[in-house]
Amino acid sequence: MKTKHSDLIDSLTTRGYRLTPQRELLLSMLSETDTHLSADTLLTRARKAYPRVNKSVVYRNLELLTELGLVSRVDFGGGHVEYEVHRHPHHHHLVCRNCHHMIGISSDTFADLQRQLADRYGFSADMDHLALFGLCHDCQTSEPANAHAQRSHHPHAL
Amino acid sequence: MKTKHSDLIDSLTTRGYRLTPQRELLLSMLSETDTHLSADTLLTRARKAYPRVNKSVVYRNLELLTELGLVSRVDFGGGHVEYEVHRHPHHHHLVCRNCHHMIGISSDTFADLQRQLADRYGFSADMDHLALFGLCHDCQTSEPANAHAQRSHHPHAL
DNA sequence: CGATAATATGCAACTGGTTGCATTTGCAAC
DNA sequence: GTTGCAAATGCAACCAGTTGCATATTATCG
């Protein structure tokens, strides 16, 4: 239990939002893990405790919690998003497109970039749980090796 | 017509993929615009010329063309992706989360970051048509102004 | 130029996620 | 404790995108 569950609940209620069993369940699932979970995983787990929870409620509440800043949405690209309780300092993810290994890195690495974007373009970038794709150290030397579902039917090519 | 249409077709056929009317149509639509188009837009436009084109074909071919490197997939986050013919040099997009204005920037800006990720983590990042969110110059001073759909029912809070 | 075989297409069923609306519930005031 | 009402939920319909499979089409070879 990394982030105090009761703090999260306070954040909700002091802002005038209701504390419902579903919200409490979501927050407790998220604060009891130290990684990110997909909406679908959250729904499935929630149903173990509470078979009636509805998927629209899960999605709506994740959106609310994200807007309130209690939860961070990590966008892994291609429509795959996961959620985690908002912890400081923010961090980012390097995702290997070959072995799917994920490296968490601190946000310092992006400070220069952020400054450059501000200077050159006047743009204030949201540097909050970015995910970047690429190849991890191990896969750079042996890329095609343990690839997943390489296109199977190259007819007479390459 | 920025990128030679016939070059794209050659890339397909020399690698052993067939040239079909649907593929030709997709490539010509993409090479005749100088911006990115969504799968849905492509489908709609394609149907004007060819009412029978099927959405699964559009999606499958966009995936194929992306794998072959003829087309780039630009991921705008939250599952919104668009496609454009792969032009050099690669560029990135700064998207304002307030006014949705989009700034195209060259990939040089990311060279430092890329080098740092390689040095520190041994990670070779795909720096290819990234999209970053944030606030553009104009919206930083007047953020809440022309916002879209601000959450409407804060009950008695903030 | 016609036959062949593998590829590409169209279709229909399905999945993850979203939306509108009727019902229920949390919470505050009485 | 009861009441009132906005907020939250559950449901069912819906939408974009994906998948499996039968059919149609392309490119090649005879």
Image (cartoon, coloured by chain):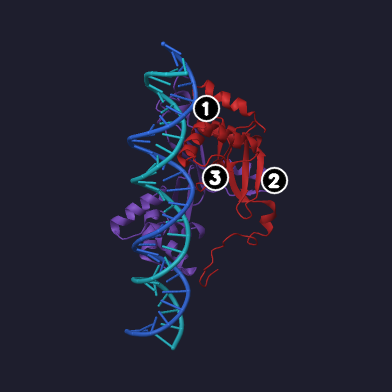
Chain colours: A red, B purple, C blue, D cyan
Q: Chain of mark 3?
A: A
Q: Eyeballing the image, is A44 above or below C25?
A: below
Residue A156 percent across, percent down from the top left: 52, 73
Residue D28 percent across, percent down from the top left: 45, 79
| Label ID, residue A44 | 3
Q: Chain of mark 1?
A: A
Q: Nearer the viewer, residue A75 or A9?
A: A9
Compare marks 1 and 3 and give the one earlier in the sequence: 1
Q: Secondary structure at mark 2?
A: helix
Tell me the residue that label 1 is attached to. Answer: A19
Q: Secondary structure at mark 3?
A: helix
Amino acid type of the residue that numbered disc 3 sits on in the rendered structure: Thr
Labels 2, 3: one chain: no
- Tell me the distance, in whole angstroms, between the alpha carbons under discs 2 and 1: 42 Å
Q: Chain of mark 2?
A: B
At 48% from the left edge and 26% from the top edge, which residue is drawn?
Answer: B140
Q: Eyeballing the image, is B45 above or below A112?
A: below
Amino acid type of the residue that numbered disc 2 sits on in the rendered structure: Tyr
How dense is the environment of label 2, judged by Cα within 10 Å: few (below 14), some, or many (20 and up)?
A: some
Residue A45 lies in quadrant: top right
Q: Secondary structure at mark 1?
A: loop
Tell me the residue that label 2 is attached to. Answer: B121
Q: Eyeballing the image, is B140 above or below B3?
A: above
Q: Nearer the viewer, residue B103 or B65?
A: B65
- Tell me the distance, in whole angstroms, between the alpha carbons under discs 1 and 3: 21 Å
Amino acid type of the residue that numbered disc 1 sits on in the rendered structure: Leu
Labels 1, 3: one chain: yes
